[in-house]
Amino acid sequence: QVQLVESGGGLVQAGDSLRLACSYSGRTFSWYAVAWFRQAAGMEREFVAAISHNGRNTNYAYAVKERFTISRDNAKNAAFLQMNSLKPEDTAVYYCATPAQVFKFSAQREEFAYWGQGTQVTVSS
């Protein structure tokens, strides 16, 4: 049974940094890409960043490029999202997710079968 658990959210001020973590269990973690999505109140869930199964490829939403960095540690079954220069518009619940298909690398929400429960990030101005 696949489980993903996010941690690291909180309340920060604009310009601050946060590091989110996603711990994973249930399958061979190193076979699967990981992505972060976020959902602000009243909005659709949107793609933030993705990393391939081996960490060699990454993809970012335009809104977070140059500010956020996705990484993973396959030995620890964990993925991370380093968020710098946070803005109030980054306020959302952040989710990590993995696809059902091995080695699949995608930014499309429908490709991701397994999701964590989310962690709240609030950025005050």
Image (cartoon, grey):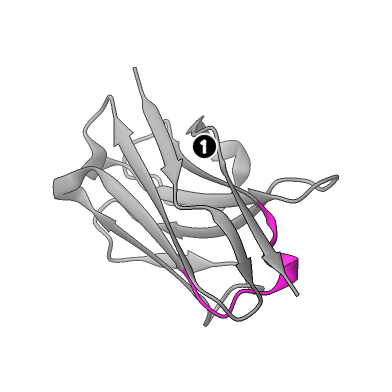
Name the quadrant of the N terminus.
top left
> Of all residues shown, which one is farthest toward the right?
42
Residue sitting at x 61%, y 43%: 109
> Of all residues shown, which one is farthest toward the top?
1
Residue 87 inside the magenta-drawn segment: yes
- Left or right, 37 with respect to 59, comes to right
Asked where in the image residue 57 lies, by quadrant, the reply is bottom left
Residues shaded magenta:
83-92
Residue 65 in percent (x, y) is at 56, 77
**Residue designated by label 1:** 112
Residue 47 in percent (x, y) is at 61, 55
Image height check: is 120 above or below 66?
above
Residue sitting at x 45%, y 52%: 8
Residue sitting at x 54%, y 38%: 111
Q: Tell how many labels.
A: 1
Residue sitting at x 29%, y 56%: 72
Image height check: is 56 above or below 43?
below
Name the quadrant of the C terminus.
bottom right
- Left or right, 7 with respect to 44, comes to left
Q: Residues within 10 Å of mark 1 (few under 14, many from 20)?
A: many
Secondary-structure class at tag 1? strand
Residue 91 inside the magenta-drawn segment: yes
- Left or right, 33 with respect to 121, comes to left
Q: Nearer the viewer, residue 71 or 19?
A: 19
- Left or right, 25 with respect to 44, comes to left
Residue 22 in percent (x, y) is at 38, 45
- Amino acid type, callout 1: Phe
Image height check: is 2 above or below 33?
above
Residue 78 in percent (x, y) is at 28, 47
Q: Nearer the viewer, residue 107 or 1?
A: 1
